[in-house]
Image (cartoon, rainbow, N blue to C red):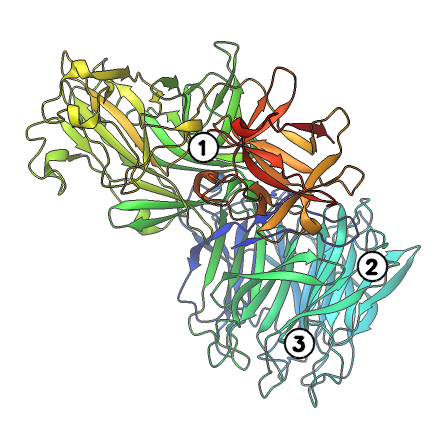
Amino acid sequence: MAFLATSLGCHAHTASSPASMPSFMKDEVEGGRSDGYWIEAFPYHAGDKTGQNLIGYGLGFENTTSKVEMFINPFNPKNKTSNWDRRQLAALEFPVSMTYADISGNGYNDVIISDRYGPSMDDIWHDGGRVSWLENTGDTNAENWTRRTMGASPGMHRLKAGHFTRTDRVQICAAPIVVKSSDLTTPAPIIIFTAPDDPKSTHANWSPVFITELHLVHEIIVVPDPQGGLDRLMFAGRDGVNFLWYEELAWKTLNVGKGLPQDAIPNSPYWGSGSVAVARVDDDYAGYIGSCEGFHGNTVSVYTKSCNASKGIVGIEWTRHVLEDFGPLNDKFTGSIHEVVCADVDGDGVDELLVAMMGSAPPSFDKTGVWCYKPTDLEKGKFSKMKLSNDSAGRIAIADLLSNGRLDFSTISYSVPGYFESPHPSINGYLSTGITAEKLNNEVCFRVPRPATTKFTSELEFLDVAARRLTLVVLPPNTEFKVPADSAVKVMFGIISWKDAKTGHNEERVLATKPFSRVEMSVHAEGVKSHEEGAVFVLFKKSTTSGQPPYSDMKQVAAHNIIPVPYPDDVRAMTFPWVKVEDTPWANGRFKGLEFYTLAGFHVRFADDSDDIIAHIQLWTAGVGVSAGFHNHVEKSFCEIHACIVNGTGGGGMRWALVDDDKFNPDKPNLDQTGLAVVPDLYEHSPLWRTGLDGFPLLRTNDTIDYPWHAWLAGSGKQSYDVWVVFELPPFVAFSSVDSSSFSGRFLIENDDSKPTSVIGLKDNSATDGTPVLAFPADHYQQEWIIARVTGTSLYQIRHAETGSLLAARWPPIAGQVLMGTHSPANMSLTSSWSINKQSDGKIILRLAATKDLVMAIEKTKDVASERVVLKVAAYEAVPPAWRLKPV
């Protein structure tokens, strides 16, 4: 499901284009746990911004200590591990909260942790609430790190490290939730611990300062100063959401909001807020504030700003909006939400709100896992919503685990006796990827985001064969992508281009080049760039781990699955053996004794509700003198392109019949009746199917593409093998002509007179499909249109700038038909593509694609202010209807 990023309110927070949510692959870090409470993304080195480890633990039990464990990130190459190996850092009694900082000053983050809490809030240890730090010496194999006490306060529940009153010492903000068992009334102290001169040599407590008192604090977050000053603090508790900062030698406070009202739930002891997070929106570090309400509640809320509010937190009137109530609380007045965090997981510059749901009894889909809320209109408090995970989530840790510039998240199941106990406690990573993979019988199905909706580049190596590593790549619009030396590309969607260092020419690749030809796939450049629609392509990287050509034996052409962790185990376990074609179930007795092989294929589809096909990819080999068999695809409708990896026979390539189908014998082909395109190493051939006007494929009566008889024929000589890839693509418009002119841009479309009297637009400026297109007086409100090239063709689409409607005809198009706006174009944009022809006198003729002479014209009507825009037959008009494109 893709979120449509609309205006985020009048505070100038508007996404530049729709952004789709990435897919998150579940990677189990640890299953079969006995309990679960806390998870933290832990940068082992103090400067690490990516590849973090994880620290996770539960509270333990009355007779069993809790193991505080660090899980080594297998995706960080520094760690040299292929699994989430664990290290026990400590065994503690009822540990609750942790944070981290480099206390020792050795460049490695140490762990600050509270323990000796007690079994529950109703059984607090009066001499507990100890705060300690565990020293990280930099030895990744070390366990049971040295613990040093910092201080204590009963009921210690949350910790955060930072610089709150000074920058020369590490400081810890510590907040108990209560001061004694079952006491929900007495406020608890908020404490700042400051490091001593030498924290390693002393066992004395750190200097504590009590800065305020708050009730039932369940969350602290650090809000860094964007100007690089002292860190600020935000608290969530019974008092609501409170912001504290140190300024001019004094602590100052702001109540952002009271949260859930005290009288909202009769007899409930819990109100206010249970967790809080500050969301960045573009360049405003506090574009909105997310919260859940109250303590372990069921309400998700946000605080937003007014139109003219400034950036930041202070001096702003915050308005509370309830996004969702997950239903009644249990008989203890608690629900399923334990934490909220804000993070820009889709990369569009606007943080999403992620909500950790512990689970419920009885089990509930809605109350288990992680929900994601994305702002669509901030000022009005409007958000869209989607589910990111389905496992119990007590807390969420945000990190770039894969070190690929994307934000991943991890969760730990909530399983605490006396509150909620997850039936299957576990720690899981959810890894952000634009490409997913699943096993489909003996083939693999990849799903990718639509390039125009993603902000991330995605890359997945999947097959090593014939000295090439085949890699699936998705590029967002107008994105540069570095390619290794000696690489090649085959485009399956969109356009990529580069300045070729070998020829000096600007090269451009689309789905296919001009029919009945060939084009080189090699990229002689350091990188390529996508265009406005983005791109999906296969990158052929050079490989030294598969056999080097030429190949005289099929054993030299072994194919290796290189799909990496963390993709599903069943996909990574797949093998891709070459199968002799005569042994396939569809050979039906053909190809006996021929050195002709194939292997399982790969599907590529869009990862949205449409599940649209991008391509099916399949590899083939043929030895000397082998014919792949003449065929014409009468059984299935698609367009295919062959991309050659190795032309081992030297003369291998595509042949096609030059005569009518009934005059060609595919079983005993007369090669004198065929054309030939030899396809050298790293070349692809062009469309071989029959096309009509403007490059639209011709169809047979059974809706299959009208192909001539055609086949790959290997060359002759000493035994060697051709290796090629077939890309089966949905029917598309082949490049119909070379058109050096370009009409792309934003325009007013006026009638072409010496003094234009009309400008076209949609009736009532309406976005409704089927809205008629009208010609309005030139002094009327002028509606703008965006004209863009249809990828790989000389045709154009004309899109209404404000509504997004395409200028289109209905099917079948006939003379006199009124043109309309639509968001639902026909297949291959048959009724919404236009040929734009500039006449010698400079006038513009707009002809509907795939028609001989149906052109856009104004239906002249007397005494009517706005006239209808229709199709007319150009040949029947005394003066061909002409237009002027006025740039805006």
Asked which secondary structure carries label 2, the reply is loop
Q: Earlier in the sequence, mark 1 or mark 2?
A: 2
Residue 555 lies left or right of residue 159; in this view the side is: left
- Give the CA distance from mark 2 to mark 3: 28 Å
The answer to whether residue 732 is above or below residue 524 is below
**Residues packed near mark 1 inside 10 Å, few (<14), some (14 to 19) or many (20 plus):** some
Write the residue at 49% across / 45% down: 449
Which of labels 2 and 3 is toward the front? 2
Most foreground residue, 851 or 867: 867
Q: Which mark is residue 850?
A: 1
Q: Which mark is residue 73?
A: none
- Give the CA distance from mark 1 to mark 2: 52 Å
Residue at the limit of the structure toward the top, as seen here:
503
Q: Earlier in the sequence, mark 2 or mark 3?
A: 3
Q: Residue 688: x and y, percent?
A: 31, 25
Q: Residue 263: x and y, percent?
A: 75, 85
Q: Which residue is mark 3?
A: 295
Which kind of residue does numbered mark 3 sit on?
Phe
Residue 874 figure quarter: top right
Most foreground residue, 378 or 420: 378
Asked which secondary structure carries label 3, the reply is loop
Asked if the residues shown at circle 1 and circle 3 are in contact, with their CB atoms under 8 angstroms apart, the answer is no
Most foreground residue, 543 or 845: 845
Q: Residue 840: x and y, percent?
A: 61, 15
Query: In which quadrant will I find the C terminus?
Result: top right
Residue 308 figure quarter: bottom right
Q: Which residue is mark 2?
A: 306
Which of labels 1 and 2 is toward the front? 1
The answer to whether residue 579 is above or below residue 433 is above
Q: Residue 266: x and y, percent?
A: 70, 89
